[in-house]
Image (tube, helix red, strand yellow):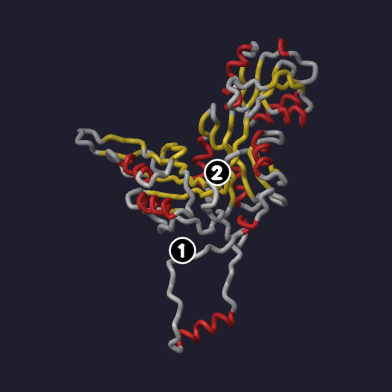
Amino acid sequence: MVVSTSSPAPSPPIPTGGGGARCRPPLTLSMPARASRRFVSASASGMPVPASRDPISLPRPLTSADLMEPTGDGLKVAYQGCPGAYSEAAAKKAYPSCQTVPCEYFETAFQAVEACVADRAVLPLENSLGGSIHRNYDLLLRHRLHIVGEVRLAVRHCLLANRGVKIESLRSAMSHPQALAQCEQTLTKLGIEHREAVDDTAGAAKLIAEQKLQDTAAVASSLAAELYGLDILAENIQDDSDNVTRFMMLAREPIIPRTDKPFKTSIVFSLEEGPGQLFKALAVFALRKINLTKMESRPHKKRPLRVADDNCSVPLKHFDYLFYVDLEASMADPNAQNALGNLKEFATFLRVLGSYPTDVS
């Protein structure tokens, strides 16, 4: 859902379920024809008609996203990587009974949900050691999917090699760049100096098994070792034991926000250039005692540079930024609605990416 101060026209900050209408029409609870005729005739005859209500306060029609079983029974869930990837484990944690759909790239997973090939996507957003996965922040803005949940997964890296290979004979380690960075010190201590980056951890395990490499190991999960017939030479080789990745769950339609359990709301906005603009934006939440759990700035790709005349002989060019923010608040809370309404008054762009239950596991 978009709440924008520029085209297209602004929408109210409460999700309205329009993300997937072309794939799954929302279940509407319409008034029977007979009741409708009675309502019309009553108004025509001068009988009292119920007072109109604020459209924002009216209940939203249910969507298929609201009716899905929490276990994910019957759901197809897209993830990036090969079978055995940590993203697949996260998908199974989020939806234990789902059918997982591996995708080559992050964008492929977004496209799979948009094209109704999959019902959900579970993709990494940040890691406690490696930081944010910036590619997915950019894709969130490019695509029209909604964040409907989050799941945290403890990452336990293993060193995998073909049967009979010893650690002493290893010259190289292959894995996703983030996984290699998370195991940098341990790999050096083991005497493995060379690193080879590939698209995902399970893909590294698959490649080593297929090519029967004898001097290269994969940094991947124990499940990948089982799937591709590799030996586990060492377990828990990450440099920090507290290695947790936060994944987002994406759908074509938003869920109905609630206030009976902890919720989080993710937004993205941009501001005019000038002193105090960011302070002013953050103040709309601080004044309402809304806690911010995450803030990420990314260059605005559609408007990367802003020309500013600061009374200099040569106009200066500044980067123009988008700010991604996570709030500890539900969009069902009027306090959060008022905060976004205040922010909308001076933000040049504002979009709600999703309002969803917080993972408290």
Q: How many marks?
A: 2
**Against 324, is 223 above or below?**
above
Residue situated furthest bottom in the rendering: 45
Say what secondary structure mark 1 lies in.
helix
Residue 321 falls left or right of residue 203: left
Residue 200 falls left or right of residue 281: right
Query: Who's the residue at 53% across and 48% down the image?
Result: 143
Q: Residue 257 at x, y = what percent? A: 53, 53
Say what secondary structure mark 2 lies in.
loop
Residue placed most toward the observer, 53 or 99? 53
Query: Who's the residue at 59% across and 45% down the image?
Result: 249
Q: Residue 5 at x, y = what percent? A: 37, 53
Residue 14 falls left or right of residue 177: left
Q: Which residue is mark 1?
A: 57
The kind of residue on which mark 1 rests is Ser
Q: Which of disc 2 and disc 1 is earlier in sequence?
A: 1
The kind of residue on which mark 2 rests is Thr
Q: Which residue is mark 2?
A: 358
Residue placed most toward the observer, 195 or 15? 15
Query: Who's the residue at 33% across and 52% down the image?
Result: 345
Q: Few, some or many C-alpha atoms within 10 Å of disc 1 (few <14, some 14-19, many ≥20)?
A: few
Q: CA distance from mark 1 to mark 2?
A: 24 Å
Residue 93 falls left or right of residue 147: right
Res 246 → quadrant? top right
Q: Residue 63 at x, y = what percent? A: 60, 60
Res 193 → quadrant? top right
Q: Residue 359 at x, y = what percent? A: 58, 41
- Name the quarter where the C terminus is drawn: top right
Query: Who's the residue at 75% across and 13% down the image?
Result: 166
Res 81 → quadrant? top right
